[in-house]
Amino acid sequence: MSRADSTLKQEVGKFLATALFFSTGFCLILVAERLVARGAGIEVASFVQAVYGGFIVAAILLVVDSLPFVNAFPGKPLIGNIVWKSSLYIAASLVYRYVKPLVKYLFQGMSLPAAASGALQEFMLTRRWAIEIWLAMLLVVYVTMRELGRAIGREQLKEMLFGRRGKPAKERYSRDAA
């Protein structure tokens, strides 16, 4: 396999893992939202929209990660990178949340001021801010785990979280008990 193919495969794998993480998170948020809205006649998103949202977030993160200033704190304590990258990702999600309806209204033939006003009204909906809070929390968890994996190594993190294949848990952690 050529180097380009290997790189492409690795990047697609990262994208799909990110999309799976956020799609799962959005589906859990959707279940909670449906439980809260049950019987109130409030329309909530579908699971397809939740999965689609996970792919959108993964694409946004891919774009933000390509910016030259994303890794602003190499070699510093993890908290600096976690706060910095989480802030960048949250800012990007807010920009997307405003631009998406703005573009939709412009394609519907609205003038720029009317489209901007409509986008701002959608942007300020309470339900959208509740979702943004959940997204911010998911982003912080995602960035924390990614930075931890970068600092100690992905394989070490996987072993710490899921254990080593073929080795009983008692043997894996016997050094901790001693």
Image (spheres, helix red, strand yellow):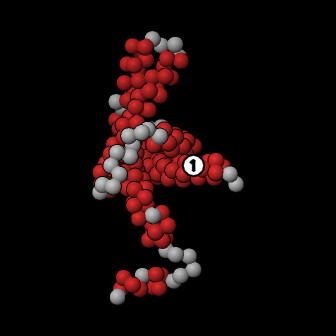
Residue 178 placement, left or right of 168: left
The picture places residue 118, in percent across and down from the top left corner, at 40, 21
The quadrant where residue 121 appears? top left
Q: Residues within 10 Å of mark 1 (few under 14, many from 20)?
A: few
Residue 91, position in %: x, y?
A: 36, 37
Which residue is the site of mark 1?
A: 11
Residue that appears at 39% across and 84% down: 175
**Farthest front residue in view:** 3
Total numbered labels:
1
Residue 86 located left or right of residue 172: left
Q: Nearer the viewer, residue 109 or 79?
A: 79
- Taking the spot 41% from the left edge, 86% from the top edge, the residue there is 174
State the SS at label 1.
helix
Q: Is residue 58 above or below residue 146?
A: above
The residue drawn where x is 44% and y is 32% is 96
Q: Position of residue 13 (x, y in %)?
A: 58, 52
Left or right of 119 on screen, residue 4: right
Quadrant location, the C terminus: bottom left
- In this view, the residue in front, 67 or 40, is 67
The reply to whether residue 9 is in sight is no
Along the viewing direction, whichever of 84 and 91 lies nearer the viewer: 84
Residue 152 appears in the rendering: yes
Q: Position of residue 73 (x, y in %)?
A: 33, 49
Foreground of the two, 120 or 57: 57
Q: Residue furthest bottom?
A: 178
Quadrant of the frame with the N terminus: bottom right
Q: Amino acid at mark 1?
A: Glu
Tell me if residue 65 comes above or below residue 108 in the rendering. Answer: below
Residue at 43 percent of width and 56 percent of height? 146
